[in-house]
Image (cartoon, rainbow, N blue to C red):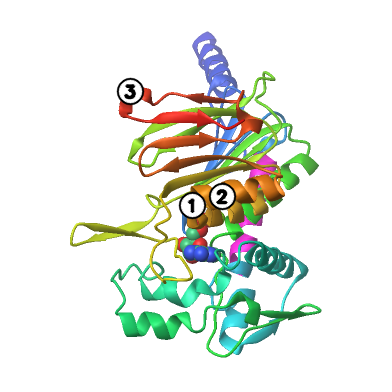
Amino acid sequence: MKKLITLLLAFLLLCSCSPKSSIEGITYSDGKYSMQIFAMDTVMTLTSYGKGSDEALLKASEEIFRLESMLSTEIDSSEVSSINSGGSAAVSDETLYIIQTALQISELTGGAFDISIAPVVREWGFISGDYHIPDAATLSSLLKNVDYSKISVSGNSVSLGEGMSIDLGAIAKGYAGQKCADLLKELGVESAILALGGNVQTVGAKPDGSLWKVAIQDPLDIDSTVGVLRCSDTAVVTSGGYQRYFEENGMRYHHIINPVTGFPADSGLISATVICPDGTLADALSTFLFVLGLEKSLDYYSTYGGFEAILITSDQEIIVTPGIAESFTFTASDTGYTCTVLE
Ligand code: AMP
Ligand code: MG
């Protein structure tokens, strides 16, 4: 009997100490709840601290899947697919907001950012995985239908010009990250970090009150980093040619397309990181700064502001905007990088 009671006590003790999760798929250890999902063609890691985090993470993951089913071009029943297949469709307020934000940004960037680049991205094989360099005739005929100014909005109805289609791949994850951060806060979470591929969204600061540390990847060696950014309550979004690409005849072709040439953007930037309290904007900004290149990006920064950036050039120069001078630690001088903080 005594042995049985000892065994029972040992069992109860084990149950109270071992990592546990009330929700399947969520791991728990030392106050940290974490879950990994695959959505929007991306591995996402959601991490949250404190009471209620498991429920909150589950809701956040459901939110991401909901947005994916609304925004993906690869899901036939999505709102974006219905715009593409019918040439026009009535959409939800959320889809409308994302499309309108994208159109405003297209205006501001003279079309360097253009969601109607979709058929060109598809032709390169970045959707199917059947990568190839399009022939010049195909590319020039597809480029005729890339023109954000032919996307019109009336009420909740979005219409495309003849032969056009759209893809929100450059902005949707930013919106999803922002929505999840807002949702976690509504659910009482004070400390979380959401990594949606190259989109990092932080909620509050770390549980001990110190700032989150977000490593900035070395675009020339993805297993290394070039520095660390300390931040709280913000989005940190990186666009880089190293994130999705294929190689042919010794050349690398990546997924961010210059709408003027139809070829992967070759602006001299190999990575553009944007730090901005609004995740949707941060995502769009990082994509188009990558297309614009260093000089035009800095012009855009000084004209409009509202964000900070870490821009990396192909000759290994790292340019940091003044608002994050104190928050960024450069760590890559021994791998040939130089770092300049703008004044
Ligand atoms: P991101 O990783 O956020 O920079 O977005 C890259 C994705 O956006 C690509 O996979 C394409 O689906 C899409 N895209 C590529 N080039 C552009 C562009 N110039 N403007 C808007 N979206 C683009
Ligand atoms: Mg983007």
Identified by mark 2, the residue type is Ser
Q: Is residue 282 above or below residue 114?
A: above
Name the disc covering residue 156, or none: none
Label located before the other in sequence (3 or 1): 1
Magenta part of the protein: which range?
Answer: 54-69
Q: Is residue 283 above or below residue 73?
A: above
Identified by mark 1, the residue type is Gly
Q: Magenta residues: mostly which secondary structure?
A: helix
The residue where tag 2 is placed is: 297
The residue where tag 3 is placed is: 334
- Tag 2 secondary structure: helix
- Of residues 254 and 34, the one drawn nearer to the viewer in this rendering: 254
Q: Quadrant of residue 28?
A: top right
Q: For the residues marked 1 and 2, what is the alpha-carbon distance in whole angstroms?
A: 6 Å
Q: For the residues marked 3 and 1, what is the alpha-carbon distance in whole angstroms?
A: 25 Å
Name the disc covering residue 293, or none: 1
